[in-house]
Amino acid sequence: MSIADVLLTVARLSTSEAARTFVAAGLPVFPCEPGGKRPLTRAGYLDASRDSSMVSTWWRRWQQANIGLPTGPMSGVDVVDIDVKPDGTGFTAFHRAVDEGLLDGEIARVRTPSGGMHIYFPTDRTRPQRCWQAARAHIDFRGEGGYVVVPPSVVVEPSGVAAYRPFSLSAAETRPIDAMALRDFIDPRPAPARNAPGRVASGDLLAHWIAKLREGERNHGLFWAACRLSEAGVQADAIVDVLGPAASRIGLDDREIQRTVLSACRHTSGGSGGLGISAFSAPTQSKSHRDPRSLP
């Protein structure tokens, strides 16, 4: 059964029945909090399983759990996420990208609880593409290192409880998306500054450190790392691009990541009421989570 067939089949099932249907089709899943997107297992999407007994055990323990599906090579699907938020919508950039032919070859479309949309594409397993976020365009890409919540999961929004609903399945030939071509079109990046290589290296090191944080350290750690990059002159949307995928992997959702990064940027620019950055030290609960500047 293809992913398109599965999405259509599970629309009217309970999440426990749907999770088993995904597994029967060879797709790995993992449980997320009922009414939300946070993983319920320690390693999040890395715990995703095709083992029917494991999946049954999870949904006996968390009967109302939502269903998470890892993206990229783990499942064979990549997803373009069109966001709808109080400060803007991704549909404007989406329509421009469609007109440009950058979103051809889709497998399916799923309406998300916020009124946005997930567009599914097959993964090119010979050329995995990493997640990115284009905050200004309100479009995200979920590939290697990411996951999406799938039907028939429900999420509590300010307007009420809403479900993920498939509404368009492609009958045409499908093909992988060129995620970087889409990114460059909807959110062109400025030319890098002379010291950009050093900044990128620092950002990669910080992202590696964030990926090892445990519950209770995550928000503080992301804030601290974002402050370091902001102090180096990196803009908020670029910080989200660098640190966002790692923060997603440890269970922080997109809105939480963006709020934390924006808060860090305001803090380092003097919007914190005069607090010095020394008031916020890096989490040091274990040796593996020490200040990333001390990592090899």
Image (cartoon, helix red, strand yellow):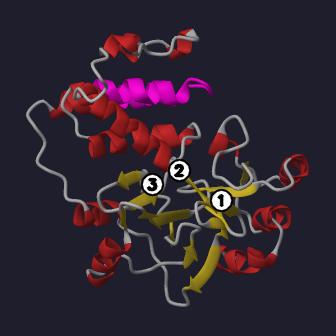
Disc 2 marks a residue whose amino acid type is Gly
- Pick whichever, 143 or 150, lies toward us: 150
Vertical placement of 15 versus 293: above or below? below
- Pick whichever, 199 or 1, lies toward us: 199
Q: CA distance from mark 3 to mark 2?
A: 12 Å
**Residue 164 location (% of width, % of height):** 64, 70
Residue 280 in view here: yes
Whether residue 208 is in magenta: the answer is yes
Q: Residue at x 52, y 16 (%)?
A: 289
The residue identified by callout 1 is: 156
Q: Are marks 3 and 2 in contact (CB under 8 Å)?
A: no
Q: Are marks 3 and 1 in contact (CB under 8 Å)?
A: no
Disc 3 marks a residue whose amino acid type is Pro
Q: CA distance from mark 3 to mark 1?
A: 32 Å
Residue 296 in view here: no
Q: Residues within 10 Å of mark 3 (few under 14, many from 20)?
A: some
Q: Residue at x 56, y 57 (%)?
A: 71
Numbered label attached to residue 146: 2
The residue identified by callout 3 is: 128
